[in-house]
Structures are given as structure tokens and as C-alpha cells.
């Protein structure tokens, strides 16, 4: 039901904006309010169901090297996955993030000095464009080349200034080449932060944000902020036990999704909700 409503709203919004561009701002504000209402309902439901609360606005600080595998794909927009708890075998992936063609393309370009146009990743995206598709949000080779130039700028910014969360970037007027022109704070959070799913044993599975994760990994960044989209129900049951008993599971006490439940020695390690920032 939610997916159908969201799809209808987006389709109607695009038609209205095409005929009356001045309404883009009010329509964007309305959709933001709609997304926030959905997320607030998710948080309220989990407060009633779980001893360990799930805050869809919470950012965890994670080691990029711990995001080893790519998560299974779930249907629907990202905001509809924020805070979900799902059982089953979706958390047993077999694709390593480091083996994806996009990461290999980043590695060849930034570490090996290979021009973007000579990477297998670029060739795949360009081939999709020639077939009339819009892979990576690009509808022409020129658009693809411009996106690659913005990736170069993002790499340089992170290398120069360190890795900053979207709240840090917006609050300090930081330059974000990939999010240029996007001022909606909730939109920046959902679209531009790295996001992960968490498997039954606490595995951090890549869900979105491949540009930033690739760059952070190549630059050796120690920690990056990440949104949690989907948690396996067995992992959530473990979180509930930790919240109820106060016991730290052997080998998992320092897991980023348990730090708030177990207590944290440093402010840096402590997960935090960014809802007040929104």
C-alpha cells in the first residue's frame, strides 16, 4: 500500500512540476513531510515491539573494511526499508563489494591512474546508455563523463578534508560534489549517506552509497557514518536480549549496532539520532 501511494505521489508530482515549475518547492516539502510521517510511524511501532529501540534516523559509525558483502535487493524506495526487520535467508549473499565492477573501476582509476573511459565499469554504463537506458542516472555519454568529474572532485574533497557526514557537510557549508543543489536535509540523509543492512550474526552488508564507500575504502578511512535499512529478525532478537539483560555478547560488544545498548567509552563511537538536525 505504501509503495503504491508513494509511486502515485511521485508520478503526479513529476507531471505537476513539468507544467508548473514554481510548485516544485511546495511539492518537495510535502513529500518530505510524508516520508517523515512514515519513518516516525516505524519508530513508534518498534518502541512498542522491541526492548532495543530502532531509530530510523540513527547514524552508526562503521569501519568501511567491515562492509564486505553486498546485500540482497529489496523492492521499494530506500525510505521504505529504513527500520525494517525481516527474516529469511536474504542475509546470505555471495557477492563481495571489492569484486564489483564499480569498486574495481574506482580502484583502477584512483589507485592505478586509469582514465575513467578505459575502465570496464565505464564501458558497461556507456553500453547501457547506448541502449536507451539511464544507468547511474546518466542519459548520455556527456552526462556520464560529467558524473565521473564530480567523482574526482568528491575523492579530492574527502582526501583533503576527511570523511564528513551529510549533517556535518550541510551545517558547515561543506562541498559535496555528488549532492550539489540538494538542500532537503532528509533527502540528503537518505540518498547520500552510505547505507547497510545487518544480517543475523551482525554482518554489515552494503546496501547503497557505493561511490562514498569505494572512495573511503581506497583512502583508508577508519570510520564512516552509515544508515541501517533492514535488520535480520534474529539480529534484532539479539539486540532485544542485550537491552533486557544488559549482557554484552562475547565478541560482539564493540559492534556498532550494539554500542548504544552496551554503553560506549567514547563520544565518537556512540551512535546518535540525527532527527533533531532535520
Image (cartoon, grey):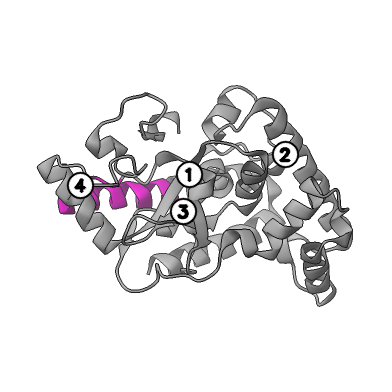
Q: Is residue 47 magenta?
A: yes
Quadrant of the rendered structure where residue 264 is? top left
What numbered label is drawn on residue 196?
3
Q: Is residue 6 magenta?
A: no
176 displayed left or right of 78: right
What residue do we see at 64% from left, 64% from top?
A: 99
The magenta stretch spans which residues? 34-54
Dot 1, how many residues are within 10 Å of its Cα: few (below 14), some (14-19), or many (20+)? many
Query: Main SS type for the magenta part?
Result: helix
Dot 3, how many residues are within 10 Å of its Cα: few (below 14), some (14-19), or many (20+)? many
* Front-most of residues 144 and 115: 115
Residue 51 visible (yes or no): no
Q: Secondary structure at mark 1?
A: strand
Give the CA separation, mark 1 to mark 4: 21 Å
235 displayed left or right of 168: left
Q: Quadrant of the N terminus?
A: bottom left
State which mark lies toward you, 1 or 4: 1
What residue do we see at 55% from left, 68% from top?
A: 95
Residue 175 place in picture, x, y as percent: 70, 30
* Front-most of residues 177 and 99: 99
Name the residue that disc number 1 marks. 226
Give the CA separation, mark 3 to mark 2: 21 Å
- Earlier sequence position, callout 1 versus callout 4: 4
- Earlier sequence position, callout 3 versus callout 2: 2
Residue 260 visible (yes or no): yes
Quadrant of the rendered structure where residue 262 is? top left
Name the residue that disc number 2 marks. 154
What residue do we see at 63% from left, 29% from top?
A: 162
Amino acid at each position: 500500500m505504501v509503495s503504491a501511494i508513494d509511486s502515485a505521489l511521485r508520478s503526479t508530482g513529476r507531471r505537476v512540476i513539468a507544467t508548473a515549475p514554481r510548485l516544485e518547492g511546495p511539492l518537495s516539502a510535502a513529500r518530505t513531510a510524508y516520508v517523515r510521517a512514515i519513518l516516525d510511524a516505524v519508530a513508534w511501532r518498534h518502541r512498542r515491539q522491541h526492548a532495543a529501540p530502532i531509530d530510523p534516523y540513527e547514524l552508526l559509525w562503521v569501519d568501511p573494511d567491515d562492509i564486505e558483502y553486498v546485500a540482497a535487493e529489496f523492492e521499494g524506495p530506500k525510505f521504505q526499508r529504513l527500520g525494517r526487520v525481516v527474516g529469511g535467508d536474504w542475509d546470505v549473499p555471495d557477492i563481495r563489494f571489492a569484486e564489483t565492477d564499480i569498486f574495481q573501476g574506482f580502484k583502477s582509476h584512483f589507485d592505478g591512474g586509469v582514465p575513467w573511459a578505459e575502465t570496464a565499469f565505464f564501458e558497461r554504463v556507456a553500453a547501457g546508455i547506448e541502449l536507451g537506458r539511464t544507468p547511474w542516472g546518466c542519459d548520455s555519454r556527456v552526462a556520464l563523463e560529467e558524473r565521473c568529474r564530480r567523482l574526482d572532485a568528491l575523492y579530492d574533497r574527502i582526501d583533503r578534508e576527511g570523511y564528513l557526514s551529510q549533517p556535518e557537510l550541510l551545517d558547515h557549508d561543506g562541498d559535496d560534489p555528488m549532492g550539489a543543489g540538494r538542500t532537503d536535509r532528509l533527502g540528503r540523509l537518505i540518498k547520500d549517506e552510505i547505507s547497510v543492512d545487518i544480517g543475523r550474526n551482525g554482518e554489515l552488508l552494503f546496501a547503497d552509497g557505493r561511490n562514498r564507500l569505494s572512495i573511503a575504502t581506497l583512502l583508508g578511512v577508519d570510520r564512516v557514518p552509515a544508515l541501517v535499512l533492514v535488520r535480520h529478525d534474529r539480529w534484532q532478537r539479539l539486540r532485544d536480549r542485550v537491552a533486557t539483560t544488559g549482557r554484552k555478547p562475547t565478541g560482539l560488544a564493540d559492534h556498532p549496532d550494539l554500542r548504544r545498548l552496551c554503553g560506549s567509552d567514547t563520544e565518537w563511537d556512540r551512535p546518535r539520532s540525527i532527527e533533531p538536525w532535520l
